[in-house]
Amino acid sequence: MSQLDWPKTFSCEFFPPITTEGLSKLQTARQQLMAMHPAYFSVTYGAGGSTRDRTVEVVLDIQAHSEVPATPHLTCIASTKSNVRELLNHYKTQGIRRIVALRGDMPSGMRDPGEFRYANELVSFIRSEFGDHFHLEVAAYPEYHPQAPNPNQDLENFQRKVDAGANSAITQYFYNPDAYFHFIDQCARRRIGIPIVPGIMPITNFTQLARFSDACGAEIPRWIRKKLESFGDDRNAIRAFGLDVVSELCRKLLDGGAPGLHFYTMNQAGLTLAIWERLGFTTSH
């Protein structure tokens, strides 16, 4: 199937906060974003200094108190088959049906990668242990993974995840739609037949965005970077310009056949909802 043939899937991502105040803000944002009727809420694994237990806590809170299914991220680096199996069994008993399966980064100070080296090994393990119980999302990199030696190697790595049993993919965020469409064309030539949903990062804070982008290899096009730099500390101007840029990006992606959008919300609802409404979608409570 081509990307045009897949039903559109819209979803939102949170990170597990490390303070009670942060958890309260997440719960408020989650409640507001339910108006979009997303297919699922995903929760990152151990982001921002939080622990695995914090991720599990947020996942189960969403699953128990939201009409939207929770989707945990699961990174395999520095993990064992035993603790991955235990965690997935726990999720299964709580009604979790979707997992974002990732390699992850080696924790600072650790040298042992554990029993998994790459995400395709995690996908293969989940399939062998749980069959088709979980819908498995994996990561894709339209601008290529920063650690990949070349584009072909990165595509081969992605194909290994698909061949291991991935059902669909979410991309790293980007601001150049041509990068996504080129990546899709490359995947089509390899007969990769799963939906690849663009990851969307609203723009709220240029300094933070530049730091994230430098770390993960996501390019901020020069014209966007220069414009954002020109606003200095004017947060309203940054927000207004970012809203224009990202809304237009989303429109081009959907018009071009992207099978949905995955919003990196940063635990805030405002800009995601504003983009949603600019795209002409309605919200209801």
Image (cartoon, rainbow, N blue to C red):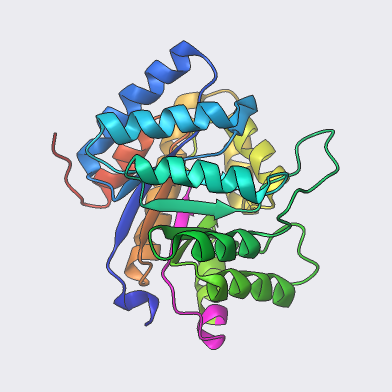
Q: Nearer the viewer, residue 251 or 283?
A: 283
| Residue 104 placement (x, y as % from top left) | 66, 48
Q: Please say whether residue 69 is visible from this viewpoint.
A: yes
**Is 75 above or below relative to 147?**
above
Q: State the residue at coordinates (63%, 36%).
A: 229
Quadrant of the rendered image containing residue 42: top left
| Residue 190 placement (x, y as % from top left) | 56, 85
Residue 188, magenta (yes or no): yes
| Residue 173 placement (x, y as % from top left) | 54, 52
Residue 147, magenta (yes or no): no
| Residue 208 placement (x, y as % from top left) | 62, 32
Q: Please say whether residue 173 is visible from this viewpoint.
A: no
Task: Check the picture and name the quadrant holding the N terminus.
Answer: bottom left
Q: Nearer the viewer, residue 257 or 285?
A: 285
**Is 117 left or right of 15, judged from the image as shown?**
right
Q: State the residue at coordinates (43%, 37%).
A: 265
**Magenta stretch bounds:** 186-200
